[in-house]
């Protein structure tokens, strides 16, 4: 689970970092003892940076007084070792020193290597865009030289930068060119680096057949290098490709081979990562014994290199394995230990993914209450991330507006300065030539008039911008639906209205929707497909509901609909229309048809237990609990809260904390509507809970679970 997620992030984030040490030295290497020493250290730097740093420091005095090629190579390797040890500030100082030294001696080869090192360090410090710009600059400089290994290295870095930005056609062209250059250089190390990068790109593009073709050549070339570390890297690349291509057995074999090589090499950091990936691989197969074995070994290895993230991931895998073995409490404790790392580091995207998969594991184990709690925490993080993204968009728009406003002010001041200069000139001319006074005054009047028109036009534009900003603050930029903020303001300004209709045949209603398996859609097809799904659902809701109904993008993949007036006995039919309307859509994305379903929670509004209307916030919270019941009981269905019974025997807080228990105890009346798979054919099965304490709830639950 979490191990697989970490593996994917590790592979992507280390493209440029791994490249920094895959390639051989420049072609100008000299055959002397110092050169040989640096060449030997270079192999350590790839996989055992602490040892490499110690050996480089032993010859630092001699290397700093060596000729340009030797000194440049020494600074390159020393910067790489510092970077791999996480000493980014020192690594950056060495890269800047190399760049200054190269410019002082007018060496494009050394300059390209220095800028590439700076790109790798910047990438490690999470400034991706700056890293890409440096890689592009290094490629331009390297192409001015005849040094093929450096040109290969720079071309690979540029190609991977394009891939990081999502421009796969440019990335593919660059990496194929790098392979051709590497073949010309007659350097197996350069060719291995280029083939490794091309295999990773084909994996990311999901062109697995081409990826395996390139991988076969990569493994053959790596075997000729007699380097355990390089072969271990190739095996890790094979694992990533096999896993994405749904060949888990091949992936496991590759990991086991990589583990043996890494242990032989003494690369403790690589060993820890490989062990946690092995535990995750066996977890997916349901082999909990091996999962526990490799996860515990990963914890031991991670502590040796002080890698808290690997240890936390191993704890999560142990917890899931224990849950799979039926050791629920032990599993929860292990997961809680792993989650503590993500909470401490405030890594909300990873935390969200971990909670989602944890909820799935609990749901599979039958712990529905625990699953709902995990899903609820995940949903809270999702809402926070969505709110941060919305605020960022608003801030960017405000900054853009302020920049435009400042630019207009600068232009206006410039014109005012010009006017003042003109007035001064006019005064001088007035003293010299009185007969030109009338003409000068006329020109001044015209200029002032033009400026006045400009100011009026600027004010009109300012008003237009303010109106546009107000509109955008109440609308979701992706779906053009109302956003949560607009709905909250609307409900606060309409509190108390419509409550008199609660006892009649016409009531208000609230519907809360959540897209089923939305993370799977994003992971499989990409975020562009996820955005297309959200806009399609928004259009479907406009078709299913009325123009008078308010449709809101509640957050992430959640939507809310407020119906101000609807027949009391028509709520189930509306829920059915929503379920089947969404299910009937087939979304075409890049030649693939995506089927989507939603889960729904709904209730009349306002809800009034004991005759006292609830606030809209508590109503939405109860509907959210109904939505999670729909999720927990199979998805593609709707749970509706129709009313309360004998609430005086319990508390509303108890109902809110465990809606399902309240249903079973007969305190609430729920309706269950089950959607069809494709939105067509016979009407969906429906089970309506009765007022009784157990029989009605049990009957509805059985129907939903069977569907």
Image: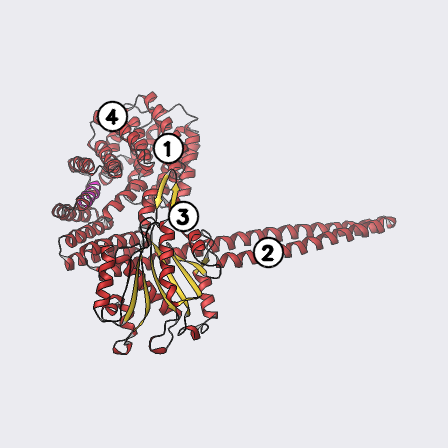
Which mark is in front, 2 or 4? 2
Labels 3 and 4: the sequence-earlier one: 4
* Circle 1 SS class: helix
Q: Is residue 279 magenta?
A: yes
Whichever of labels 3 and 1 marks the residue nearer the N terminus, that label is: 1
Rendering quarter of residue 14: top left
Q: Is mark 2 on a helix, strand or loop?
A: helix
- Judge from the rendering whether residue 407 lies leftward or rightward of residue 653; answer left or right: right
Residue 23 makes an appearance in the image: no
Q: Which of marks 2 and 1 is nearer the N terminus?
A: 1
The residue at which mark 2 appears reads as 464
| Label 1 crowd (10 A; few <14 / some 14-19 / many >=20) | many
Query: Where is mark 3, residue-wise?
Result: 531
Dot 4: few (<14), some (14–19), or many (≥20) neighbours within 10 Å? many
Residue at (50% x, 56% y) in the render: 472
Marks 2 and 3: which is nearer the front?
A: 3
Location of mark 1 (residue): 113
* Residue at left offset 71%, top offset 53%: 451
Residue 637, quarter of picture: bottom left
Segment tinted magenta in the rendering: 270-280
């Amino acid at each position: 689970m979490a191990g697989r997620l970490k593996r994917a992030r590790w592979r992507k984030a280390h493209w440029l970092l791994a490249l920094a040490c895959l390639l051989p030295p420049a072609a100008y290497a000299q055959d002397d003892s110092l050169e040989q020493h640096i060449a030997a250290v270079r192999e350590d730097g790839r996989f055992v940076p602490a040892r490499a740093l110690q050996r480089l420091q032993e010859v630092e005095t001699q290397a700093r007084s060596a000729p340009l090629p030797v000194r440049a190579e020494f600074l390159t390797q020393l910067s790489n070792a510092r970077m791999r040890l996480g000493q980014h500030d020192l690594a950056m100082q060495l890269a800047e020193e190399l760049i200054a030294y190269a410019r002082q001696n007018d060496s494009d080869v050394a300059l390209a290597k220095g800028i590439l090192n700076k790109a790798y360090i910047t990438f490690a410090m999470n400034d991706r865009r700056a890293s890409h710009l440096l890689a592009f600059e290094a490629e331009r400089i390297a192409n001015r030289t005849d040094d093929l290994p450096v040109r290969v290295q720079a071309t690979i870095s540029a190609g991977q930068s394009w891939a990081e930005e999502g421009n796969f056609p440019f990335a593919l062209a660059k990496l194929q060119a790098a392979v051709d250059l590497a073949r010309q250089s007659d350097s197996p190390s350069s060719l291995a680096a280029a083939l490794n990068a091309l295999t990773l790109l084909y994996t990311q593009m999901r062109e697995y057949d081409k990826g395996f073709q390139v991988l076969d050549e990569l493994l053959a070339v790596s075997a000729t290098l007699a380097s355990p570390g390089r072969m271990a890297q190739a095996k890790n690349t094979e694992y990533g490709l096999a896993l994405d291509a749904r060949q888990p057995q091949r992936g496991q074999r590759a990991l086991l081979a990589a583990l043996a090589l890494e242990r032989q090499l003494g690369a403790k950091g690589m060993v820890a990562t490989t062990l946690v990936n092995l535990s995750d691989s066996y977890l997916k197969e349901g082999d909990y014994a091996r999962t526990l074995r490799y996860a515990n070994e990963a914890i031991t290895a991670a502590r040796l290199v002080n890698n808290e993230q690997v240890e936390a991931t191993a704890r999560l895998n142990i917890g899931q394995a224990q849950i799979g073995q039926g050791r629920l409490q032990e599993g929860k404790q292990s997961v809680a230990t792993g989650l503590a790392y993500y909470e401490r580091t405030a890594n909300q995207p990873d935390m969200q993914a971990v909670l989602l998969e944890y909820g799935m594991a609990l749901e599979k184990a039958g712990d529905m209450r625990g699953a709902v709690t995990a899903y609820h925490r995940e949903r809270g993080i999702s809402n926070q991330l969505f709110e941060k993204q919305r605020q960022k968009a608003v801030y960017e728009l405000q900054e853009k507006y302020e920049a435009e406003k400042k630019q207009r002010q600068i232009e206006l001041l410039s014109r005012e300065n010009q006017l003042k200069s003109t007035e001064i000139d006019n005064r001088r001319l007035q003293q010299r030539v009185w007969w030109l006074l009338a003409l000068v005054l006329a020109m001044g009047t015209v200029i002032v008039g033009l400026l006045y028109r400009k100011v009026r036009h600027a004010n009109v534009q300012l008003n237009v911008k303010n109106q546009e900003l107000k509109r955008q603050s109440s609308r979701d930029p992706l779906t053009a639906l109302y956003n949560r903020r607009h709905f909250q303001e609307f409900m606060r300004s309409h509190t108390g209205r419509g409550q008199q209709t609660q006892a009649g045949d016409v009531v208000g209603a609230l519907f809360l929707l959540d897209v089923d398996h939305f993370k799977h859609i994003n992971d499989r097809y990409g975020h562009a497909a996820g955005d297309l799904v959200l806009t399609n659902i928004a259009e479907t809701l406009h078709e299913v509901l009325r123009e008078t109904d308010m449709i809101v993008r509640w957050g992430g993949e959640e939507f809310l609909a407020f119906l101000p007036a609807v027949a009391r006995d028509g709520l189930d039919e509306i829920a059915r229309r929503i379920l089947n309307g969404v299910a009937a859509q087939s979304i075409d994305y890049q030649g693939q048809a995506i089927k989507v379903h939603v889960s729904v929670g709904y209730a009349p509004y306002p809800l009034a237990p004991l005759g006292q209307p609830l606030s809209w916030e508590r109503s939405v919270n109860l509907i959210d609990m109904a939505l999670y019941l729909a999720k927990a009981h199979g998805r593609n269905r709707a749970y509706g809260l129709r009313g309360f019974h004998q609430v005086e025997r319990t508390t509303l807080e108890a109902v809110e904390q465990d809606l399902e228990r309240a249903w079973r105890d007969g305190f609430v009346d729920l309706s269950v509507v089950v959607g069809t798979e494709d939105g067509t054919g016979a009407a969906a099965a429906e089970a309506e809970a009765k007022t009784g304490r157990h029989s009605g709830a049990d009957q509805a639950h059985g129907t939903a679970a069977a569907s």
